Amino acid sequence: MAGGVSRSAVFDQALAHWLRERRQVELERSIEDHYHSLSTAERAEDDAWAESGDDTVRRVWNEPKR
């Protein structure tokens, strides 16, 4: 299964993969917690900034508004 790689190398790779996955999950959870903690006014402001960014991308890429 290891394809000629030593056991310690397999373990190192598995641990590195597990740590990357764990960090990604923690980051996603942190982002989700942040957005759930926003007040109504903060959500409205965030939506306005997102729409502004969307408009800019559409203008640059010449895409029609959805």
Image (tube, rainbow, N blue to C red):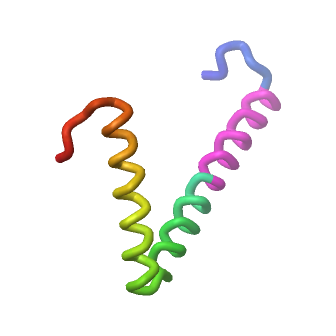
**Callout count:** 0
User: Who is closer to the viewer here, 11 or 41?
Assistant: 41
Q: Is residue 12 above or below residue 48?
A: above
Percent x, y of residue 50: 40, 58
* Magenta-drawn stretch contains 13: yes
User: Who is closer to the viewer here, 53 or 35?
Assistant: 53
Q: Residue at x 47, y 73 (%)?
A: 35
* Magenta-drawn stretch contains 45: no
Percent x, y of residue 18: 65, 47
Q: Residue at x 31, y 39 (%)?
A: 58
Q: Quadrant of residue 40?
A: bottom left
> What type of secondary structure mainly makes up the magenta span?
helix
Percent x, y of residue 15: 72, 43
* Drawn side of residue 20 relative to residue 7, left or right: left
User: Who is closer to the viewer here, 37 or 59?
Assistant: 59
Q: Quadrant of the N terminus?
A: top right
Q: Residue at x 78, y 36 (%)?
A: 12
- From which residue to which does the magenta span run? 7-23
Q: Residue at x 17, y 47 (%)?
A: 66
